[in-house]
Amino acid sequence: MGALCWSNSATAQDSLRCGEAILFSRNEEGGYAIGWQYRGSIFSTYDNNHPVSLMIDSVSYAVNYRRLTKQPATWVGEATVETPGGSRFAVKDVYTLAADKAAFVMSREVNVLKAGSDKWFNSFFGVQGNALNDIKDAEVFVPGTWYKDNRYLPQYALAADAASNYFYFREDRLPLPLVMCRNKNNASTVTLMHLSADPQTFFEESGLARITDARMQFGAIGLQQQQNLTALFQFPGCEGDRTYVSRYSFTTGQSIATRGTGNWAMRSHPVQTGIQHRYTLAVRFSHEPDFASALNNAWQYTYQQYHSAVHTENMKAVFNEEARLLNDYWRNIGGAPGWPFSVYLPSGNTRAYDYQMGFIGFQVPNAYYLLRCGLETNNQSMIDKACKVLDFWAAEAATDNGLPKSWAEPYVDKPFGWRKYPQFMRIAGDGMEGALLAWSIMQRHHISKPAWLKLCTGFGDWLVNNQNEDGSYYLNYNWWDNGKPGHNSKYTTTNVIRYLVELYRVTRQQRYLDAAVKAGVFSLNAINNDYLYVGGVIDNPNVKDRESGQQAMYAFMALYDHTKDHQWLDAAVQAARYTETYMYAYHVPMSQGDTLTDFPANKTGTGQTLIATGHSGVDNGLSFSSFQYYRLYLFTGDKHLLQVARMAMYNTLQTMDMDGSMGYRYKALQTEAFSLSGNTRGHSVRQWLAWNTAAVMDPLCRFKDAFNNVDIDAIEKLPLAQRRQLNEQYGKTSGLVEKE
């Protein structure tokens, strides 16, 4: 894949200009080759500078255009490929500028003019930079998969091995089909995007063996690292040399356990006349000062091309349905009150009752949400149930040193016990914040709960006394072993910063604020400045994930609210922009012929988010952050953040059964995780977990505190000046009552 050495003078004539980038052509080998020039660097096409590349029955064909027709704003390249097997292909590429003149657009159509003895084919298009031949000199962004470098990825992850030559990713795994590559040496950045993607597939499309079928209309996008680093697109999409596709085949009925390394899932189109083989790509050149800017510009540009619809819901009805669910599922088992760990769907039958304070269990915050609803509607049953849960945790989870226990296990035939499960900063941050909010709302209703506050200040004091010299906290601590650290990762330090700020607001004890700021400075350097959001999904490996971005957003916003120092706001915005790149922003249809999908055809996956790198599981977890995205929109005036806030509020509810189409026992039930890739699109774990309800209730309670409304679209009807004033007022108190 050697790069042709074109002189800069060759670009001066017959060129198509897009800002500082130029698309140019040259007579070559009896035809026409094309390339790009950007800021003095030459970029060429995928295979030996030939613009047309096909793979036909394992043989590569790379040819130039035999005809290149040029008009002022449009170029049309045409090529023919013939094989020894008697097949004949016609390729037509149309080059134009995007409507905003910020990218080149290439629309390709491949027609089989004659089908000989050949069986299958794929086509390729790519952009390689002659000045970049080592991935270590690049910063790469592939949504939900690759962030800057290959650090902190599971060893089996698609992008884990920098020494690999091939990084082909099925586009249905990606929240948006794009790859961005930034040259660290000169800041030149190339973004390759698939526009108008409609990644169709069918239920039997499984296994690693080559499948040849015209129904597959998805591509693969990624990088190839050989002589030069190439951003490429392949259609239909093969995945390798790592893949999450299992070795199960519906054809053979056999399955061999595998997870990625050194495998290819081969997919091709049949060589037959009349087949649909077309796609549209965009190539964008830019000069980006840093990776964060490059990621944001690549993501937002692609996001704007898709215009994904927002599916609104009646948020008051959603809030009430969630409260009803919590009220009905509450049980007191062996002296331990709480909610199920999980519930089967669609039946709504309980799988198990055991109680984790936060994270996936969310026992304590859910008690706060139910308590709040009870107080606001004068429902004494809700109040009593919630108080029993909070009283239980205040009495039983506390330890002498202040680090609370994390996971209670109720039994029907004996007293409850405590699992020897480490206290993660993630679990404690979630849980103790719920206790503090519950104490505060009781104070607002003139009801004193000193035991709840004692639990909160006990943990706050533990955080002050156990903070590392650099301001960090470890991933987890063994509460049964006098709080001995259980893991030395420090990347979840952000998980307790908002809690410390809120505890300061309630108590006005300076030590809590000092600890929060010290932890913030550590997080600014280790996480924000290094663009390394790691470890928030504590039941996954300690890897890059979405929830680390969410936790960083909460932490930095809390510090900004108190200090008004813009370094914290900038860090919160960066974390928000990172986090949203895990969100599906284009529609991935369900597999054709799949009768096992858990979602009706009228549902969409847009707004759902990948959970972490290393797999393709998605959930409604971005729902937690609709409030923060909305506040950031008001702080910055960036309407893109408003769009994300609306997606996070409304579209995440597509997995909820508000319209009754999924037959769930309760309308507010949602599945904990599911897939939007491969042939298992719409297949889920078919279980609700307690965090699913917390993800919806938490932002709605915060919206109510700040704007006295739970619906973004209703809030948007207020004058902008009033919304900004309410936003600032909320930032002064976080909706909390100060201790008298």
Image (cartoon, helix red, strand yellow):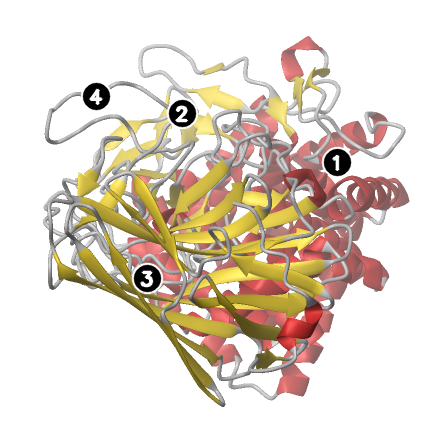
Q: Identify which residue, 428 or 642, lies in the foreground.
A: 642
Choose mark 4 or mark 3, whichever is in front: 4
Check whether the beta carbons of the residues at disc 3 and disc 1 lie within 8 A of each other: no
Q: Residues within 10 Å of mark 4 (few under 14, many from 20)?
A: few
| Among the two numbered marks 3 and 2 on one chain, the one whose residue lies closer to the N terminus | 2
* Residue at 31% in and 33% down: 245
Q: Identify which residue, 555 or 34, lies in the foreground.
A: 34
| Among the two numbered marks 4 and 3 on one chain, the one whose residue lies closer to the N terminus | 4
User: What kind of element bears circle 1?
Assistant: helix
User: What residue is disc 1 on?
Assistant: 457
Q: Which residue type does callout 1 highlight?
A: Thr
Residue 395 coordinates in the image, percent (x, y):
59, 26
Using the numbered discs, state the Cα–Cα distance from disc 3 to disc 1 in whole angstroms.
46 Å
Choose mark 3 or mark 2, whichever is in front: 3
Using the numbered discs, state the Cα–Cα distance from disc 4 to disc 3 in whole angstroms.
29 Å
* Residue at 55% in and 66% down: 35
User: What residue is disc 2 on?
Assistant: 354
Residue 255 circle label: 4
Residue 587 circle label: 3
Total marks shown come to 4
User: What kind of element bears circle 2?
Assistant: loop
Residue 434 coordinates in the image, percent (x, y):
58, 43
Using the numbered discs, state the Cα–Cα distance from disc 1 to disc 2 in whole angstroms.
25 Å
Choose mark 2 or mark 4, whichever is in front: 4
Residue 233 coordinates in the image, percent (x, y):
42, 54
Q: Identify which residue, 372 or 137, lies in the foreground.
A: 137
Check whether the beta carbons of the residues at disc 2 and disc 4 lie within 8 A of each other: no
On screen, residue 668 versus residue 194, left or right, reads left
* Above or below for 61 versus 397: below
